[in-house]
Image (cartoon, rainbow, N blue to C red):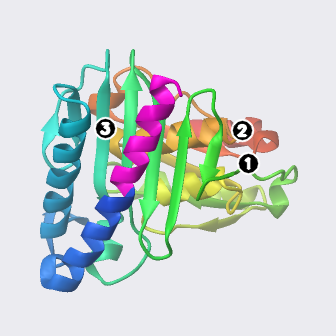
Amino acid sequence: MTDLARRRDIMTSIAVDAAALAARLRVEGGGIGTLKSAQNFVTEADTATERFIRERLGQDFPGEAILGEEMGGATDGAGPLWVLDPIDGTSNFARGGDRWCVSIGLVMQGRAVAGAVARHAPAEVFAAAEGMGATLNGAPMRAAPTTDIRRATVECGWSMRLPIAEYHRMAMAVSALGAGVRTGGSGTLGLVESAAGRLDAYLERHINSWDAAAAIVIAREAGCWTNAFDSGDWLAGGNPIGVGAPALGDRLAVVLAG
């Protein structure tokens, strides 16, 4: 087993355990959300889960840098750098919904090279390492074979990081192509579900590194069209992101560019 495959397997195990911990903490009362900013929730479970992931990574990879949504950290991607979101979809989590997940990505030389995304219920884990393919619960997965944008379902992500008009313009552009539009409150899940072919694409004009460091690897390894998300100052400042069925890439890229 290569070092990268070993890292993928360890991070996958940690992500699964972290999702189980977050679910338990919610039952115990740790799912009450407070606002960091408009529509940007954090719960006690977020911080406890991030602390758990950091401790586990520290045991297996002592001294390696970590960047997390709740506790910050290094943004020098020379690597190895672990980039994590303890709970993506916190607003869903805080309301008792099941559309949330744990995301752990690995960055080397500024590029995301491995990732694991775990849900607790339903029990699903998406994982990938560069050059080794992508899996869902251990089975290989591939992007949708969709060739007609009029048959596509596209998730358009939004956040308060940009004016809401930016989201409206993008959603309208997707709709004008004849595609169905949806949004689900977890960018990470939208990305990996596109990688699994459940969606035909996910587009967002700005997303943070911890939301997508794992998912971008999973999407690439599943054969998706992807934009150059993990480039430039993406670790500190985020970037636009787009992934989708490979045959739709040219049209999706135009929509994402605005």
Amino acid type, mark 3: Val
Q: Mark 2 points at which residue?
A: 223
Q: Does the magenta stretch include residue 209?
A: no
Marks 2,3: beta carbons within 8 A: no
Q: Which amino acid lies under the numbered mark 2 shown in the image of this protein?
A: Gly
Residue of label 1: 142
Residue 55 appears at what percent x and percent y?
16, 45
Q: Which mark is residue 83?
A: 3
Front residue of this view, candidates 241 and 120: 120
C-alpha distance separating marks 1 and 3: 24 Å
Q: Relative to the observer, which residue lies in front, 183 or 173?
A: 183
Residue 218 location (% of width, % of height): 57, 42
Residue 163 visible in rendering: no
Q: Earlier in the sequence, mark 2 or mark 1?
A: 1
The magenta region covers: 1-15
Q: Earlier in the sequence, mark 1 or mark 3?
A: 3
Quarter where residue 196 is shown:
bottom right
Determine the secondary structure under disc 3.
Answer: strand
x, y (%) of residue 67?
A: 23, 36
Circles 2, 1 touching at the beta carbon (< 8 Å): yes
Helix, strand or loop at disc 2?
loop
Q: Work out whether 206 lies above or below 236.
A: below
Marker count (numbered) = 3
**Predominant secondary structure, magenta span:** helix
**Distance of mark 2 from mark 3, alpha carbons?**
22 Å
Describe residue 214's horizontal placement relative to residue 15 as left or right.
right
Q: Quadrant of residue 129?
A: top right
Crowding at dot 1, Cα within 10 Å, few <14 / some 14-19 / many 20+, comes out as many
Q: Which numbered disc flags the more N-terminal residue, 2 or 3?
A: 3
Q: Residues within 10 Å of mark 3 (few under 14, many from 20)?
A: many
